[in-house]
Amino acid sequence: MAAYDWLFGALGLKDWCEQEASGGPMTMAQLLAQSGKKVEGAAEEAAGSLWDAPFPSLDVLHESCSSVARTRDMTSWVENLFLSIKDPLKVVLDPISQPLSWALDGSLWLFQTVPWFIVIPLLLLAVWGATKSWKLVAFVAISFLFMAFIDHYVPAIQTLSIIFVCTGFSVLLGVPIGILMSRSDGFQRVSLPVLDMLQTLPTFVYLIPLIFLFSVTESKLYGIAIILYAIVPVIRLTDLGIRLVDKDVIEAADAFGMTDKQKLFGVQIPLAMPNIMAGVNQTIMMSLAMVVIASLVSAPGLGVLVLRGIRNLELGVGLVSGFGIVLLAILLDRVTKASLGRINVTQKQ
Amino acid sequence: MSNGPKVSIRGLYKIFGSNPQAMLPHVHGGMGKPELLDTYNHVLGLQDINVDMQAGEITVIMGLSGSGKSTLIRHLNRLIEPTTGEVIVDGENVLDYDEQQLRRLRREKMSMVFQKFALLPHRTVLQNAGMSRLVRGEDETTAESHGRPWLQRVGLDGYEDHYPHQLSGGMQQRVGIARALASDSDIMLMDEAFSALDPLIRTDMQDLLLELQNELQKTVVFITHDLDEALKLADHLVILKDGYVVQQGEPQHILLNPNDPYIEDFVSDINRARVLRVRSVMSPLNGETAFAGVVDVNDNLEKLIELSGGDTTHNFKVQKNGEDVGILHMKDLVRALVPTRTGEKGTVR
């Protein structure tokens, strides 16, 4: 009757197939058949020209042999597998990731509790300290005053505080991982595919397991999502930066009897600093991109307004908050690039 | 030196490839560099090197690129591990050292000057000069107090707070030399230290090295591909070709008695009048009294030609520290200016 009956017949598996005639969730086709309507195409299948043979997928094979699982069975296995490892995984991951929640909540609280007339000057001071450029300080000042003026100060500062925390964690975790990668070719070979995967996996895809693992009310949910996405460049560029350190200088360090530790902190990391900072710059940009998507899982900030714009078709709200994000992106990029430039000047070869 | 050479290399072999130890029997059996490469795909870097380096002398190792001279110098402080052989420094075989002892050797006994300077680009000139002290664990002030006088000695007064990239090549190499001297090591390894400098500055640096050497009496191992430089600096000259020692000895002697066509080719191009000294061409006192003048044993022949006005009939009295030691016939001098051919001379040593 079905397309691949002959196959199971030829293999002598007919008995095995009929062992388990029923069971499992019903398919739409079965439902239709039950309600008395004929499944279209059944007659044609009987005619059975080779030209019309469907691909022997799980669903098609199931029609011929009910012992073969359907694709929806397969996805539910995956689901069950994930659900079964979820609890032990949670026991491990929950305490480890707890500091992230504290840091995110703490920094959100701090930035929103301290009044604007203290936060904005402090930010400007930090920009001055990092870049020593009046132009950038003025640009940041104007941007923030403008956003505050159009009542976007709170979401902007929320977004900024999330980015600060996530970038901080990314650097804290990413630089040591990068150093390990630069020292061991084996570890590099293992890590590179993982990093590739993190970079190419659509961001929505790893939101799904995260939602199951952590409650949506916990801030570490979006924190982890952002860090997983944004940590990649800082790892890659730390690895690259250390590997690119001038071989002659390393040889000199060896010739003067430096220990591995002296070499790492006295030579390799300082000389890799321009590359590491370029990685940090990329990490900041990527966490900004992710913070918008993370608003789907309750991350506060400008992303929430963008989301509102999409959901309620409030075009203006979406566009203005989108512009705010662009503004944040530009100023974060300029400030980190300018401080990077200052590092480069002091270590030109 | 009464108690033997300061540094002594005995039967040193270096084979590059996947399994160097297995190649040793072939090499001992007389297989040459090209055959080893063709049959076994291993590169014979150094073969049967035996060199004694006396304390307080400049030993120059000369050879063209690929002759293994840079590989050889790196065996002295084990930046490269030999396949077999001994490197004896002050009576101890460096190759038996463990990591700790090796580090002490590099920190306190041997310092190194590099072709590409290999200064730390993120440290000031003064910090670079004190680097060897910092590596030993001394504090910043002590390190700088050791670095500062050496910077003055090499003529870099007032550049202490500059960064290496702000200095010219010659000045950077002066920092490199100050860095090596500041470690107070007995042995200085100089790997093509002046090859990256332009000719005038190179001459300056050679004079500086000779001047320092007069004062400090270090054991210097100097690598170069430039015969003029080698002849100017060397107390003991070792000529390498394809990883083996072609000839070694007193440079004037090698110049007058080359034992290999390879060395003849080398010496045929140099300005012999400038390199050869009176002591190499003078004859013993024979009672003659008619002298056109008095010269020192260490004057070069160029000066003599100038003194005699090109007249080959003159004889000069040769003095050493004010005592008469020999006679120089201008005819001998002129003859010495023409390179000897091993074939013509018939005495291959």
Image (cartoon, coloured by chain):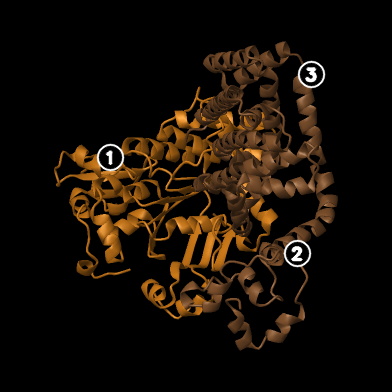
Q: Are marks 3 and 2 in contact (CB under 8 Å)?
A: no
Query: Tag 1, which chain?
Result: B
Residues packed near mark 2 inside 10 Å, few (<14), some (14 to 19) or many (20 plus): few
Q: Which mark is residue B294?
A: 1
Query: In x, y percent, where is residue A218?
Result: 80, 38
The kind of secondary structure element at disc 2 is loop
Residue placed under numbered mark 3 in the picture: A113
Q: Which chain is brown?
A: A
Residue at the spot 68% in from the left edge and 59% down from the top edge: B98
Label 1 in the same subunit as label 2: no
Disc 1 versus disc 3: nearer the observer: 3
Q: Are marks 1 and 2 in contact (CB under 8 Å)?
A: no
Q: Residue type at mark 3: give it.
A: Thr
Query: Tag 2, which chain?
Result: A
Tell me if residue A210 comes above or below residue B139 in the rendering: below
Query: In x, y percent, where is residue A58?
Result: 63, 70
Which tag, 3 or 2, sits closer to the chain's start? 2
Residues packed near mark 1 inside 10 Å, few (<14), some (14 to 19) or many (20 plus): some
Q: CA distance from mark 3 to mark 2?
A: 53 Å
Label 3 in the same subunit as label 2: yes
Q: Which shade of the palette goes to chain B?
A: orange
User: Is B288 left or right of B36, judged from the image as shown?
Assistant: left
Q: CA distance from mark 1 to mark 2?
A: 117 Å
Task: Work out whether residue B111 can be spotted.
Answer: no
Task: Work out whether residue B174 can be spotted.
Answer: yes
Quadrant showing the N terminus of chain A: bottom right
State the image quarter where residue A139 is shown: top right
Q: Which mark is residue A25?
A: 2
